[in-house]
Image (spheres, helix red, strand yellow):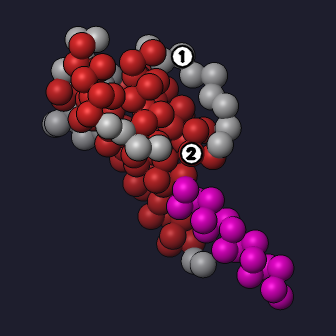
Amino acid sequence: MTDAHDTGLERIREAARRGAPRIQVGLDAATREVVFAYATAEARGDTSTATLPNEVRTFVDAVVGRAVEADVQALQQAGRSDDFIYELAVLAAVAAGSQRGVMGLAALRASRGAAS
């Protein structure tokens, strides 16, 4: 594996954490950081100590695993906007997916090192 894989994954993770300023309308920067850290920890199988509102935590857990319509409805009933829900879903998915990519690359490197 080349460092290009690491660099690519890191760029994706940073872009998700920062958000696109012109379209960022649902999540503030502080919430974005907490959600990103929480989703990354969950994807690793770690327990996160992040403080999130219950409906947000439930939704992020679902995105990391599998979100269903009831999860979206719970956020809507809690007063969350469609923009908030969309950004939350994208952020959690990118955080969890890129963390899985990091773990996959590490496993490949370890197996190649063990085979040497």
- Give the residues in magenta: 100-116
Foreground pick, 110 / 1: 110
Badge 1 element: loop
Give yes or no for contact between labels 2 and 1 (Cβ–Cβ under 8 Å): no
Q: Is residue 17 above or below residue 32?
A: below
- The quadrant where residue 24 appears: top left
Identify the image quadrant of the C terminus: bottom right
Badge 2 element: helix
Q: Residue at x 58, y 59 (%)?
A: 102
77 on left or right of 100: left
Q: Residue at x 32, y 42 (%)?
A: 90
Instruction: Give residue 51's mark.
Output: 1
Q: Is residue 108 above or below residue 56?
A: below
Q: Is residue 115 above or below residue 89?
A: below
Instruction: Give residue 43's mark.
Output: 2
93 on left or right of 25: right
Disc 1 residue crowd, few under 14, some 14–19, many 20+, Cα 10 Å: few
Q: CA distance from mark 2 to mark 1?
A: 17 Å
Disc 2 residue crowd, few under 14, some 14–19, many 20+, Cα 10 Å: many
| Residue type at the position of mark 1 | Thr
Prevalent SS, magenta region: helix
Instruction: Give residue 71's mark.
Output: none
Q: Is residue 47 magenta?
A: no
